[in-house]
């Protein structure tokens, strides 16, 4: 059983470096039930698109499917778990995104998870930014920096989104932008330049 939209497997283009059979097996665990019973669609119509080593990666901006039960999740193989952590990093529920990004960072996650980690960092949940920064700040993040450099136009948009959320929600707590965790994450770990527009 796969989640299909217009005949295509949702997230079918989100894991080009993983065997398709493993992706389909992981995706078959996602329930059809959605948050707030929003309807039959489990994702929105917007996609996120990146390149990694010149290979295109495309995945939905948001996932509305409810979370897989922990008892099911714990029985999955490592790669299946990594796929589903990535998938649920796109959840419409910020707590679910935080949970799965934190779990992804806690394991020795493969390089193909990088697009999902970077993407969630241009959003408004500061706890996610803090979790990613704390996990990456003392590590070699050259692979993240290379990924961001390969996707520079998209990365600049992400940087600007991160700034706009700081301005809207966190400016009163972090009046000096230099102290904001999002800025530190983007500059120290992702390779943003101090003079980015």
Image: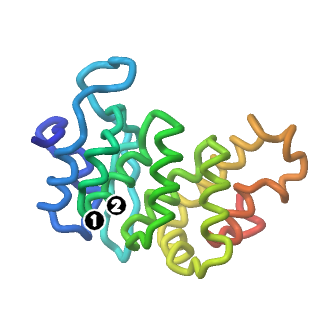
Q: Which residue occupies 67% across, 45% down?
A: 126
Q: Relative to 186, does residue 144 appear above or below in the rendering?
A: below
Q: Which residue occupies 35% across, 49% down?
A: 87
Q: Which residue occupies 26% across, 26% down?
A: 33
Q: Circle 1 is placed at which residue position?
A: 79
Q: Relative to 162, does residue 34 appear above or below in the rendering?
A: above
Pointers 2 and 1 in contact (C-beta within 8 Å):
yes
Tell me where residue 165 sits by quadrant. top right
Give x and y (percent) for residue 166. Answer: 74, 44
Q: Nearer the viewer, residue 25 or 40?
A: 25
**Quick one: SS at disc 2?**
helix
What is the C-alpha distance between the residues marked 2 and 1? Answer: 5 Å
Q: Quadrant of the N terminus?
A: top left
Give x and y (percent) for residue 27. Answer: 21, 48
Q: Relative to 183, does residue 27 appear above or below in the rendering?
A: above
Give x and y (percent) for residue 104. Answer: 45, 60
Q: Can residue 44 be seen in the rendering of this structure?
A: no
Q: Which residue occupies 48% across, 34% down?
A: 93
**Residue at the outermost front position:** 71
Q: Circle 2 is placed at which residue position?
A: 82
Q: Can residue 29 be seen in the rendering of this structure?
A: yes
> Does residue 60 appear to the left or right of 137 in the view shown?
left
């Amino acid at each position: 059983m796969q989640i299909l939209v217009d005949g295509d497997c949702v997230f079918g283009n989100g894991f080009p470096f993983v065997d398709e059979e493993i992706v389909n097996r992981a995706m078959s665990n996602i329930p059809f039930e959605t948050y707030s019973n929003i309807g039959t669609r489990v994702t929105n119509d917007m996609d996120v698109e990146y390149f990694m080593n010149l290979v295109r990666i495309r995945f939905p901006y948001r996932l509305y499917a409810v979370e897989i039960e922990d008892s099911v999740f714990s029985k999955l193989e490592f790669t299946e778990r990594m796929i589903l952590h990535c998938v649920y990093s796109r959840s419409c529920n910020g707590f679910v995104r935080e949970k799965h990004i934190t779990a992804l960072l806690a394991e020795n996650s493969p390089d193909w998870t990088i697009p999902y980690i970077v993407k969630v960092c241009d959003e408004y949940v500061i706890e996610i930014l803090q979790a990613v920064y704390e996990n990456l700040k003392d590590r070699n993040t050259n692979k993240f920096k290379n990924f961001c450099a390969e996707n520079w136009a998209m990365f600049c948009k992400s940087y600007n989104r991160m700034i706009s959320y700081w301005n809207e929600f966190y400016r009163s707590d972090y009046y000096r932008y230099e102290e904001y965790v999002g800025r530190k994450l983007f500059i120290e770990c992702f390779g943003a330049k101090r003079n980015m527009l």
